[in-house]
Amino acid sequence: MNSINSKKNSSFYTLIFLPALLVILFLTIYPVVNTLFLSFFKYNYLSDDRRFIGLKNFITIGKDQVFRTAFLNTILFALFATVFEVALGIFLALMFYGQFPGKRPFMIMVIFPMMVSTMVVCAVWKVLYHYDIGLFNYILKSIGLAPVGWLTDKTRALSSIILVDIWQWTPFAFLVLQAGLNSIPREIFEASSIDGAGYFRNLRSVTLPILSSQILLVIMLRTIDTFRIFGKVYALTQGGPGNATETVSYYIYREGFSYFNLGRASAAALYVLAVIALIASFYIRGIMKEEN
Amino acid sequence: MMKKIIVPLIALLFALPPLLFAGGSQEQEGGPVSLTIAGRDGAYGDAMQLACDEYAALHPDVSFEILKLSGSSLFEKTVIDMKGNVGTYDVILIDDPNATQIYKAGWLADLDALYRERGLALDPDFIAPLTMLGRYPYGDAGTLYSLPLVGNVELFAYRKDLIEKYKLQTPDTWDRVMTAAKTIAANEPGVYPVLFRGAKGNPIVTGFLPLFWAFGGKVLVNDKPALDSPQALAALKFYLELAQYAPEGVAMYQSAQVKDAVYAGTGAMAIEVWPGWISDLDNPEVSNVVGKVAVTKHPAQVEKSSPMIGVWLAGIPESSKNKGAAFDFLQFLTSAEMQEKMADVNGMPPTRTSVHKVPALVEKYAWYPAQLDGLQNGVPRPRTTKWKEIEEALGTYLQMALIGDLSAQDALTQANAKIGEILE
């Protein structure tokens, strides 16, 4: 009797789950399969010219100097932006764990950049970075230093965009880590203090190990997000000067939506997917290990 | 009981969409019509709004929905809609560089046929080279797919007060431009001698091509890349020398920066301005250079003045459900009366000869004779479906030369090779 009930229950749950599964399949698996399929074709959406070319798109893109530069830039962007955002997020979370006057308004100020749309953020920073009328060059000039081409100097442009991303997304890391920090019972810190541990010992041996899963989560989320960097490049430099700020997402956008070369855009997108899947797999492995 | 409710509901759910689409696909004859316009934002969007309001006042049965989009968004949305044969839009604006691809795909209604149906003919008042841009294949014999709406052509602007002050010759050749740049650099510390758009892709190419053409350069010859010529090299070397007199961050200059510098009087010569940028040059509320700037056609060199024509065209998607009503509106939109109003109110450059000669407009916009000359004698972008990719490639290598990453020779050699790949 129990077995019949259990089978009935199982069928019921399968039936309930089926619509959601179909939606997931349609919205995630189908686009990935379709992208994979398209990547084997020379396919121009405008002219409808579609020819099977096997792996040629992957090979051509792999040899394309612009794509290589874009890939390297994307990795540098993801690496530096994530490291700084997480490090600053930890610092801010620890700072806000204590009490100090003006904590509330200061906190609103800290999380404000995250609430502003990327295009607005870029418009503001574009003015700040302006060679002639920008605030940064005004400060440099007022202290007797030469102005800097923040977005026009090929050696600085990428780091200037990274700085904008750090400004906008550090609050996200801060909020997640602060939530994690607040969930740690204060008794643990009190106990370790009674045992003679100082602030830094506490931080190294208690706080950071307990926060490690949140830190890992923020690292993964920010790495994936920064790896897809598009809006800031589009609004601030459009990939220039030269190819100094080309990124993979911008490359895909141009191939896909400016030239409508869907085969090449799909192949480039699969390169990105592979990297993101790799990053996610590290995180999932970490989570599984913890669960085990 | 539940079944009795659910089954008819599901049946209705499946039956409703086809019924709705069937209803929507019929062209409306008589009765109220709603036209959806995919247009541009900014001044062009305001001009379109003006035309739609005027038309709706004259034809109360016609209403409008106007989408005011950025250039790239307009292209993406209209392509996806027309490719899918969805029929959302009844009139679309097309930027000239994208026109050939759209015509070739066969997504636009044949305007010649619509003219014949109405017993009308294309008005010869339209500036002839501009109507050729609306035909595919390019030329007089092609089928007409769009009408020229915005008479955009590149112009050259210079501070005539500075040219007079230093007793320089009018900069009507590129050599004279260089001489003037050197003189102004030596004597006017607060003024950038030369301004242009240096951002990669379309901006830098658009600024460079009038100079390149005047030096005898060609991007394509018989659909093959032709940047490996001595003329092309001479043009790029000259351009890079001229760039030494441009602002420090010129490699990232877009239209806003050029326009700001011209209006502020901090630029002596803009090697590229468009009619839409300069409509307020003599408005003392926004301009520091009232009466000081001359706007003319481009300097010549070994070839005659070669400004680039960059019109915006208006067409009717083949998938439109209101082609007849859209055609009537298109006639109104491009009429001499409406163009005159849009020019007067919104500063939109006309595409008709007669409107360029309206005395009140010529008085208001002193560069109209130069603009008309440019539209009649200017050079259109090469007519290829691959222009966007070619422009991006050329723009990337030009900018690399501008920022010193590549020599002029290497930039042209690499651009030539890349364009060859694109055309394969």
Image (tube, coloured by chain):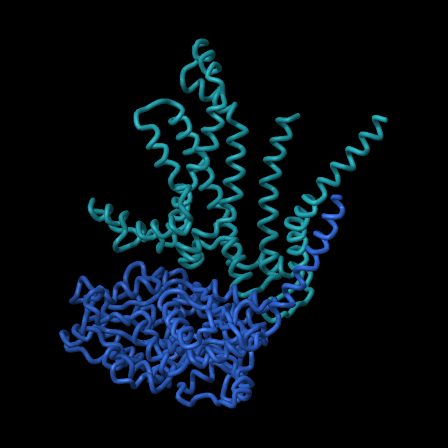
Where does residue A187 sit, x and y in percent of width and height?
47, 14
Where does residue A12 sit, x and y in percent of width and height?
76, 37
User: In the drawing, does residue B231 fall left or right of residue B146?
Assistant: left
In the displayed structure, B240 sits above or below A112; it is below
In the displayed structure, B68 sits above or below B103; it is above
Q: Quadrant of the N terminus of chain A?
A: top right
* Numbered marks: total: 0
- Which of these two is toward me, B400 or B139? B139
- Which of these two is toward me, B85 or A46? B85
State the image quarter where residue B335 is shown. bottom left
On the question of residue B272 being in view, the answer is no
Tint applied to chain A in the drawing: cyan
Where does residue A241 sit, x and y in percent of width and height?
40, 58
Q: Residue at x 59, y 35 (%)?
A: A283
- Which of these two is toward me, B90 or B102? B90
- Which of these two is toward me, B343 or B174? B343
Furthest-front residue in this view: B1
State the image quarter where residue B365 is shown. bottom left
On the question of residue A20 being in view, the answer is yes
Tint applied to chain B in the drawing: blue
Q: Quadrant of the C terminus of chain A?
A: top right
Furthest-right residue in this view: A1
User: In the drawing, does residue B188 fall left or right of residue B84?
Assistant: left
User: In the drawing, does residue B221 fall left or right of residue B216?
Assistant: right
Q: Residue at x 34, y 28 (%)?
A: A103
Where does residue B114 sit, x and y in percent of width and height?
54, 84
